[in-house]
Image (spheres, grey):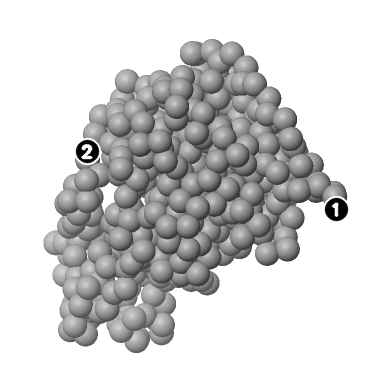
């Protein structure tokens, strides 16, 4: 599975759309605003409101860092209605700086992320103000959001607080009501070349970027708030002189070879790693394998790696191993499919350019980027085709360079079924995004904007 995910600072739209039910944190905002009435019908208007970046008031010398709330979209009332009054009050009190949460993550989290225990002390309690003070490191808090997620989709909501600072660092904290006591069960950080995402069903992804190498760690937070490590994968461009085995053999018609590595151990050695390969021609078109060919470049590379002692698998074996371990850690098919059978497979196929999504001109809510200027109403496109058309359009307008994209899943429709959000990483003040929805087995571009 070719990764074309840019690892960097997430956009406002990305952060604001990563879960339903969100409000913004502003420094020196003392009064909480009551949520507006929410419509049960999702619309492009709700989506556009959700993607608007909130302003944050500066902190004066005399003022404290008391956290307050500012409503960012009127979908907030919907998930709060799913909570009992006790949980709702606990979360709001924590958000308002009146309640503490104890740092009490799972043993697996402790094993996988020991460095966070230099930041927070195990079994210590913290207010939101305490957390901001601990992580800001003299940087101004530019953005803060709260949103509700539903780990394991069990109907018991968790609070996800995201903090973004002016030096490009970011932190996510998941706070869970455990029998009337708030617990910080997960935290992650982001920086310029790596980024963390928490999907609204509890799946976690940590992306890392280093030159020609891109990696990601995957985990899952269950309904009890316990973190489970899932797998790590890494893609690197194995040039003829810099492959893991040294020099690759000459391959007719092959310009690029990508190593795809999988391991189910966070700290892994050669024996714990599994590899498969993707090959492209000089125009970056993927070369499909022909097993019947006497001159099969895939088999040539596999043999070279096997001879060097590496574990070699096929893409199908990769997918099966990942699925088997997913089930072992309690990440069930129902939750993985986001409560909509077949959605995940469709979305992943779209990401791999194996499925198309139909564009509806009425979904275009962009201010800076008008998708209707380069996409045709009722036409269907692969993701690559959308990127190519956007890049051509962009060169004629702002000429901002697009450095890949960031994906996430959310419940924009507020119907318990997830949509796929793709945010284009463009180095400018806006970040174009696409929301793709599974409608009766067909992919529709539900909304686009910036």
Indicate which disc residue 450 carries.
Answer: none
Kindly give the residue lying farthest to the right in the view shown: 61
> What residue do we see at 35% from left, 60% from top?
109
Describe residue 374's horizontal placement relative to residue 257 as left or right: right
> What residue do we see at 30% from left, 31% from top?
154
> What residue do we see at 27% from left, 78% from top?
269
Please name whichever residue, 174 or 312, is drawn nearer the observer in this view of the structure. 174
> What residue do we see at 59% from left, 47% from top?
128
Describe residue 53's horizontal placement relative to residue 412 as left or right: right
| Mark 1, residue position | 61
**In 3D space, how far apart are the residues under numbered discs 2 and 1 (Cα atoms)?**
52 Å
Q: Is residue 157 above or below residue 11?
A: above
Label 2 neighbourhood size at 10 Å, few (<14), some (14-19), many (20+)?
A: some
Dot in front, 2 or 1: 1
Label 1 neighbourhood size at 10 Å, few (<14), some (14-19), many (20+)?
A: few
Q: Is residue 350 visible?
A: no
Q: Is residue 158 visible?
A: yes
Q: Quadrant of residue 340?
A: top left
Kindly give the residue lying farthest to the left in the view shown: 292
Describe residue 326's horizontal placement relative to residue 380 as left or right: left
Please name whichever residue, 197 or 377, is drawn nearer the observer in this view of the structure. 197
Q: Position of residue 31 (x, y in %)?
A: 72, 30
Q: Position of residue 245 (x, y in %)?
A: 30, 84
Question: In the rendered structure, which disc, 2 or 1, sits on the residue that comes first in sequence?
Answer: 1
Please name whichever residue, 443 or 186, is drawn nearer the observer in this view of the structure. 186
Which quadrant does the N terminus fall into? bottom left
Tell me, yes or no, whether the two marked residues, 2 and 1, touch with CB atoms within 8 Å: no
| Mark 2, residue position | 333
Element type where label 1 sits in the image: loop
Which quadrant does the C terminus fall into? top right
Element type where label 2 sits in the image: helix
């Amino acid at each position: 599975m070719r990764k074309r995910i840019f690892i960097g600072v997430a956009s406002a739209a990305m952060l604001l759309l990563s879960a339903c039910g969100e409000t913004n944190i502003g420094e020196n905002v003392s009064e909480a605003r009551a949520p507006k009435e929410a419509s049960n019908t999702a619309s492009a208007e709700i989506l556009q409101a959700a993607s608007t970046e909130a302003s944050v008031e500066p902190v004066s010398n005399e003022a404290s860092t008391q956290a307050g709330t500012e409503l960012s979209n009127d979908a907030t009332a919907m998930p709060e209605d799913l909570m009992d009054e006790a949980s709702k009050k606990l979360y709001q009190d924590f958000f308002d700086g009146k309640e503490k949460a104890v740092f009490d993550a799972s043993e697996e989290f402790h094993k996988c992320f020991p460095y966070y225990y230099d930041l927070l002390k195990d079994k210590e309690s913290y207010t939101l103000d305490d957390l901001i003070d601990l992580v800001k490191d003299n940087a101004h808090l530019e953005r803060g959001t709260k949103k509700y997620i539903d780990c394991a989709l069990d109907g018991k909501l968790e609070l996800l607080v995201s903090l973004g600072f002016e030096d490009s660092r970011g932190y996510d904290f998941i706070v869970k009501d455990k029998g009337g006591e708030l617990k910080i069960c997960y935290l992650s950080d982001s920086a310029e070349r790596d980024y963390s995402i928490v999907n609204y069903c509890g799946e976690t992804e940590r992306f890392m970027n280093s030159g020609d190498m891109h990696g990601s760690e995957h985990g899952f937070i269950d309904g009890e708030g316990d973190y489970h490590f899932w797998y790590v994968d890494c893609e690197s461009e194995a040039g003829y002189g810099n492959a893991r085995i040294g020099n690759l053999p000459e391959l007719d018609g092959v310009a690029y070879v990508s190593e795809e590595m999988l391991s189910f151990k966070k700290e892994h050695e050669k024996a714990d790693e599994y590899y498969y390969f993707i090959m492209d021609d000089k125009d970056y078109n993927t070369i499909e394998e022909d097993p019947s060919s006497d001159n099969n470049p895939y088999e040539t590379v596999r043999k070279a790696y096997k001879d060097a002692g590496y574990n070699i698998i096929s893409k199908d074996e990769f997918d099966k191993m990942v699925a088997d371990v997913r089930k072992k850690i309690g990440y069930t098919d129902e939750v993985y499919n986001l409560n909509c059978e077949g959605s995940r497979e469709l979305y992943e196929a779209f990401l791999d350019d194996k499925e198309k999504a139909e564009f509806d001109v009425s979904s275009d809510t962009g201010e800076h980027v008008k998708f209707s200027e380069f996409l045709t109403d009722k036409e269907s496109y692969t993701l690559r085709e959308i990127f190519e058309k956007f890049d051509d359009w962009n060169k004629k307008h702002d000429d901002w360079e697009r450095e890949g994209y960031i994906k996430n899943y959310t419940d924009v429709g507020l119907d318990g079924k997830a949509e796929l959000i793709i945010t284009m990483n463009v180095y400018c003040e806006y970040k174009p995004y696409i929301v793709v929805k599974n409608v009766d087995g067909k992919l529709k571009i539900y909304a686009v904007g910036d």
